[in-house]
Image (tube, rainbow, N blue to C red):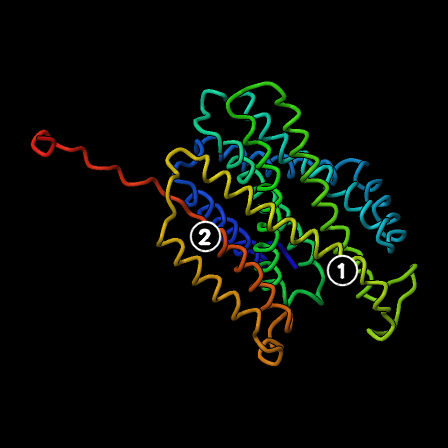
Amino acid sequence: MMVQQMWLPFAVVILVSALYVLLFRSLFPQAVNGRLAVLAFGGNIAVVLVGVALFAKTGFGPNLTSALQRDLQAGHDLKASLLLAFTYAALPEEALKIGVVALLLKCSPSRLRQASDGFQLLLSAALGFALVESCIYVYVLGDQAELSHSLLAFALLRGALGALLHSLLAMVAGYFLLSLWPPAGYRWLWLAAAYIAAIILHAAFDGSLLNLIFQSGGMSDGDVMTGPEAIDPRSVAVPAMVWVISSALLVIGGLWGLRVALRRTTGATTASRRWQGAGLATIILAVLLCIVPAKFAAGTTFGAALAPAFGVILFVIGLMVAMKRKPAAALPVPDAASLQ
């Protein structure tokens, strides 16, 4: 499919990313410096695009592709899948996101105003990376004729899920960046802790999911199975458990980091009742989507899994929305007459 015919899927990914940006900017009573946020967001996009250009124009690309294909063919057990995700995804992606933020924190100390600035910058960096990554996925799948009819739905799901995943990883790592304010000793130790936490969760999530795809796709030791009956339930039990645990840690750790960051934001002193109501409404909608009967969702592009997938995404977003805080109303200053 030509790029000119893919403008709508690309527009969907961009729109979803913009909604995430607006959400996170609105959650904090005092947002981080806008110029720094743009640099964190655009810096990740620029570095990824430069990497893609080098990949396409130099001999490094074919070598990396061959190595990746070789590792994929040998990566059908859980250990190999985890190592594959650790090497090709977690290590470089988290280094890019955290590295850009560390550079901004180092070069622009005068623009930092509050303890949550590093946390917010990492969220911006994560959304920038998720945007360009989702666009790359859409572009690659757009060349496959058998998937062209579902490309728009894929763009919507990939844009929402990719941004959420990278946002949660940023929240987990961003919790450690809160300790960088005010500037003090052990700064690089906190950066290392943020990086280690992010790559462990990232590798566990991606690696276990990759292994589940191998198993459910009927691939085992390079042999193609004929159908779902060929899948051994025992072979998916362990990767499924790892995926569930890593997903739970991502959500719990991410929301905890967001909660702490909101409480350390200047002026964040009371909960916002309106946002709590909006969060509750979003959670109710998410629950309804999760329990949509399969027969009603079967006609959609991805079948019965599409509605529950969006339900899970909206559920986590609803929890985030409900955590919005606002400055407390100032107490009235008593006049002289009232004091007599």
Label for residue 321? Answer: 2
222 relative position to 179: left or right? right
- Residue 119 sits above or below residue 245 on the image: above
The quarter of the image holding the C terminus is top left
Closer to the camera, 333 or 291?
Answer: 333
Amino acid type at mark 2:
Val
**Relative image position of residue 66 (x, y in whole percent):** 86, 45
Measure how far apart labels 2 and 1 are at the Cα level. Answer: 29 Å
The picture quadrant where one finds residue 220 is bottom right
**Relative image position of residue 302 (x, y in whole percent):** 64, 69
First of labels 2, 1 by sequence position: 1
**Relative image position of residue 122 (x, y in whole percent):** 56, 36
Closer to the camera, 177 or 22?
Answer: 177
The local secondary structure at tag 1 comes to helix
Residue under the image location 77 percent in, 42 percent down: 86
Outermost residue on the front side: it is 340
The local secondary structure at tag 2 comes to helix
266 relative position to 201: left or right? left
**Relative image position of residue 322 (x, y in whole percent):** 44, 53
Q: Which residue is mark 1?
A: 240
Amino acid type at mark 1:
Ala
Residue under the image location 59 percent in, 57 percent down: 6
The picture quadrant where one finds residue 179 is top right
